Image (tube, rainbow, N blue to C red):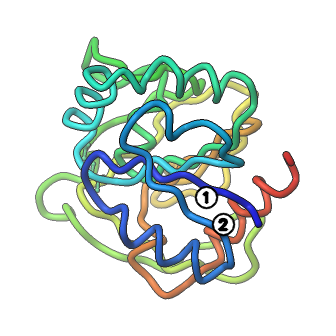
C-alpha cells in the first residue's frame, strides 16, 4: 500500500485524508520531523501559509522536508501549499521552502472573488475538474521547466515541476477524486 503523509499543522487536512483513503492509500499525519520518514508522497494542504510556514520552522520540520523533496519525494501543495513551495512571492521578501521555479501572487482574486468555483480542464485529467478557490493564490510567472496544467482567466492554477505538483484550488473539498488520483499516480510512478 502506498503511504502518503499529510502535513497537519493547520488547515484542510482531514478532507485530504478522506480523499486519499477513498483511493486506497495509507495516510500518515505529519506533526513532527520523524513522521516524514518512510513516506512515498507528501501533501501540503491549504490553510494560512504564514502560520504553516512559521510552524514548520519552529517545529524543525522544514529542513527535512526540503531535503526529502530535493531527493525526489513526490509532493502536492494545494493553495497555501503552493505558496510554501514557491521560490518567489510577488511583493514579498518572504519565502518558505523555495523549491519550485514559480512566482506566486497570494490572495490573488481580491475581495469580490475571494471564494468561487469553476469547472475547468486540467492536463492529465479527462473532462473538466470542479475547482474550489478560497482566497487562492495563482502562478504569475514560471520557468520553462515548469509544466502548466490548468489556466483560469489567463492565470496558472495548476502546475508541475518533476516531483512537485501545485494547485491553487481545493480538490479535497469536492467529491471528485481525479486530482488526488493524478497525484497518487505520480507517487506510484516514483516508487
Ligand atoms: N490565502 C491563504 C494564504 O495566503 C491561502 C488560502 C488557502 O489555502 N485556502 O496562505
Classify 10 Å Cα crowding around label 2: few (below 14), some (14-19), many (20 and above): some
Residue pushed farthest left? 111
Percent from the top left, x then y, of residue 157? 50, 53
Query: CB of residue at label 1: within 8 Å of ligand 1?
Result: no
Helix, strand or loop status at disc 1: strand
Query: What residue sits 29% from the left and 39% below the top?
Result: 106
Helix, strand or loop status at disc 2: loop
Residue highlighted by disc 2: 122
Residue pushed farthest top? 93
Q: Quadrant of residue 68?
A: top right
Instruction: Identify the mark nearer the N-term, 1 or 2.
Output: 2
Residue closest to the eye, 152 or 84: 84
* 87 with respect to 184 (left or right): left
Residue pushed farthest front? 34
Percent from the top left, x then y, of residue 137? 35, 46
* 114 with respect to 103 (left or right): left
Contact? badges 1 and 2 (CB < 8 Å): yes
Residue highlighted by disc 1: 150
Q: Quadrant of residue 59?
A: top left
* 111 with respect to 100 (left or right): left
Location of the N terminus by quadrant is: bottom right
23 over 48 or under it: above or below? below
Percent from the top left, x then y, of residue 92? 25, 18
Query: What residue sits 29% from the left and 72% below the top?
Result: 116
Residue closest to the eye, 13 or 155: 13
Query: CB of residue at label 2: within 8 Å of ligand 1?
Result: no
Amino acid at each position: 500500500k502506498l503511504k502518503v503523509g499529510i502535513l497537519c499543522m493547520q488547515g484542510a487536512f482531514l478532507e485530504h485524508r478522506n480523499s486519499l483513503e477513498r483511493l486506497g492509500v495509507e495516510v500518515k499525519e505529519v506533526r513532527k520531523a520523524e513522521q516524514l520518514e518512510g513516506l512515498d508522497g507528501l501533501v501540503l494542504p491549504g490553510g494560512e501559509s504564514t502560520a504553516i510556514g512559521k510552524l514548520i520552522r519552529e517545529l524543525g520540520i522544514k529542513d527535512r522536508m526540503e531535503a526529502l523533496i530535493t531527493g525526489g519525494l513526490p509532493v502536492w501543495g494545494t493553495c497555501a501549499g503552493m505558496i510554501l513551495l514557491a521560490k518567489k512571492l510577488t511583493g514579498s521578501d518572504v519565502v518558505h521552502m523555495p523549491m519550485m521555479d514559480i512566482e506566486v501572487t497570494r490572495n490573488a482574486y481580491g475581495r469580490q472573488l475571494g471564494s468561487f468555483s469553476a469547472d475547468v480542464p486540467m492536463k492529465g485529467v479527462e473532462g473538466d475538474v470542479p475547482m474550489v478557490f478560497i482566497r487562492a493564490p495563482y502562478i504569475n510567472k514560471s520557468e520553462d521547466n515548469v509544466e502548466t496544467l490548468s489556466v483560469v482567466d489567463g492565470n496558472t492554477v495548476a502546475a508541475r515541476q518533476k516531483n512537485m505538483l501545485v494547485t491553487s484550488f481545493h480538490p479535497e473539498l469536492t467529491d471528485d477524486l481525479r486530482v488526488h488520483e493524478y497525484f497518487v499516480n505520480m507517487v506510484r510512478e516514483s516508487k
